[in-house]
Structures are given as structure tokens and as C-alpha cells.
Image (tube, rainbow, N blue to C red):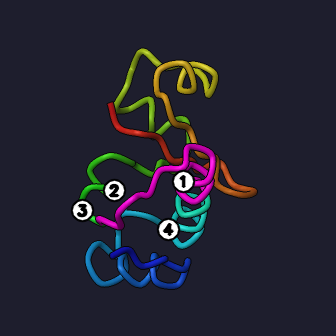
């Protein structure tokens, strides 16, 4: 039996289990990405906060990302290096799938 998860449910789950992994805006963008993925691929995703935190990271900007991945020089490089790049509305922040 599956339960649909609203954006409020999604954010509440992260607030309870991993409150510092993503910003509010980051969670909203990740939620929207996952909902679109489910719709586009006809695949249901289970809400597993720990798994999502292990598989996705939010970055403040390109410079922060470059500290972890020194071979990256641009956003274009990041998009090439990781299968998932999720920009966060009107900021320099973004989410990537961990590799």
C-alpha cells in the first residue's frame, strides 16, 4: 500500500530526521524533481530520508563544489559529471546526485 506524499509531508520528514541536509528551497526543488521523475518514468519512489541524503547533496555555489571536486571548473562541467543537477530558484545553490 502506497501513500502519496505532499510537499509538507516531505519537508516534515526531513525536518524530523535530517534538518540540516537541505535548505527549505532545496527541499522544494528536490521534491519537484522527484515528482516529475515519478510522472515521467511511471516509477513510484519511496520516501526514504536517509537514502535521499546519501544520494543527493546541496551546494551553496560552484566554489563550494570545487572544494570537493577540484577537476570541476564550471556549472557545465558539473552537469557533465553528474547525471542529476537541480538548480535552486533564484540562487547560486544547486543539488547534485552524489557520485
Side of 70 where 51 appears, left or right: left
Give the vertical position of 50 relative to 87 (above or below). below
Residue annotated with mark 4: 23
Q: Residue at 26%, 50% (x, y): give it.
A: 54
Total marks placed: 4
Q: Earlier in the sequence, mark 1 or mark 2?
A: 1
Task: Mark 3: give few (<14), some (14-19) or many (20+) Cα within 10 Å.
Answer: few
Secondary element under disc 2, as helix, strand or loop, is helix
Question: Looking at the rendering, in which quadrant would you find the N terminus?
Answer: bottom left
| Distance of label 3 from label 1 (alpha carbons) | 19 Å
| Distance of label 4 from label 3 (alpha carbons) | 16 Å
Q: Residue at 51%, 36% (x, y): give it.
A: 84
| Distance of label 1 from label 4 (alpha carbons) | 22 Å
- Residue situated in front as seen by the camera: 81 or 74: 81
Q: Which residues are magenta?
A: 33-48
- Residue situated in front as seen by the camera: 54 or 71: 54
- Residue situated in front as seen by the camera: 42 or 70: 42
Residue annotated with mark 1: 38
Q: Earlier in the sequence, mark 1 or mark 4?
A: 4
Residue annotated with mark 2: 52
Task: Mark 2: give few (<14), some (14-19) or many (20+) Cα within 10 Å.
Answer: some
Q: Earlier in the sequence, mark 3 or mark 1?
A: 1
Which label number is shown at residue 27?
none
Q: Are marks 1 and 4 in contact (CB under 8 Å)?
A: no
Q: Residue at 55%, 36% (x, y): give it.
A: 62
Q: Residue at 30%, 84% (x, y): give it.
A: 16
Amino acid at each position: 500500500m502506497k501513500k502519496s506524499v505532499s510537499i509538507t509531508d516531505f519537508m516534515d520528514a526531513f525536518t524530523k530526521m535530517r534538518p540540516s541536509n537541505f535548505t527549505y528551497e532545496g527541499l522544494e526543488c528536490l521534491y519537484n524533481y522527484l515528482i516529475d521523475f515519478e510522472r515521467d518514468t511511471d516509477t513510484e519512489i519511496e520516501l526514504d530520508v536517509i537514502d535521499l541524503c546519501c544520494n543527493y547533496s546541496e551546494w551553496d555555489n560552484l566554489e563550494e563544489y570545487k572544494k570537493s571536486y577540484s577537476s570541476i571548473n564550471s556549472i557545465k562541467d558539473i552537469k557533465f559529471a553528474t547525471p542529476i543537477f537541480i538548480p535552486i530558484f533564484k540562487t547560486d545553490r544547486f543539488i547534485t546526485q552524489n557520485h
